[in-house]
Image: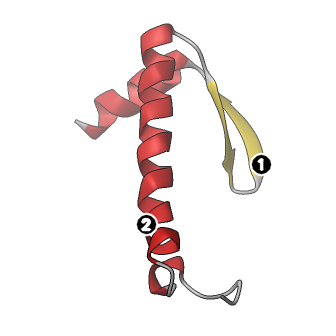
């Protein structure tokens, strides 16, 4: 697979499914951080960003 190819077009079904799995894992990590009142670290625009549980809660409320 070429690094510039879209992962959704991969021949390997596990590779195609990996994007959805990573999205589910990210959602679960955010939910766990909110429940345990801890923050998470993400990469946003190439920069490491720390999000507190409070910021995560605000993001969830804004999406409702």
Q: Quadrant of residue 49?
A: top right
Which residue occupies 60% across, 88% down? 5
Q: In the image, residue 59 lies at what x, y percent?
A: 41, 33
Q: Describe residue 63's horizontal placement relative to residue 43 as left or right.
A: left
Q: In the image, residue 1 lies at what x, y percent?
A: 66, 88
Q: Nearer the viewer, mark 2 or mark 1?
A: 2
Q: In the image, residue 9 lies at what x, y percent?
A: 47, 87
Name the mark on residue 17: 2
Q: Callout 1: few (<14), some (14-19), or many (20+) C-alpha neighbours within 10 Å?
A: few
Which residue occupies 22% across, 35% down? 64
Name the mark on residue 47: 1
User: Residue 4 or 51: which is nearer the viewer?
Assistant: 4
Q: Label 2's element?
A: helix
62, above or below 33, in the image: below
59, above or below 24, in the image: above
Which residue occupies 43% across, 33% down? 28
Q: Label 1's element?
A: strand
Q: Describe residue 32's horizontal placement relative to residue 45 as left or right.
A: left
User: Residue 61 or 22: which is nearer the viewer?
Assistant: 22
State the CA–CA distance, disc 2 to disc 1: 26 Å
Which residue occupies 35% across, 31% down? 60
């Amino acid at each position: 697979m070429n690094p510039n190819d879209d992962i959704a077009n991969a021949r390997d079904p596990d590779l195609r499914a990996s994007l959805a799995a990573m999205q589910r894992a990210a959602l679960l990590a955010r939910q766990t951080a909110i429940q345990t009142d801890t923050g998470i670290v993400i990469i946003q625009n190439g920069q490491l960003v720390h999000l507190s549980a409070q910021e995560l809660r605000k993001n969830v409320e804004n999406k409702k």
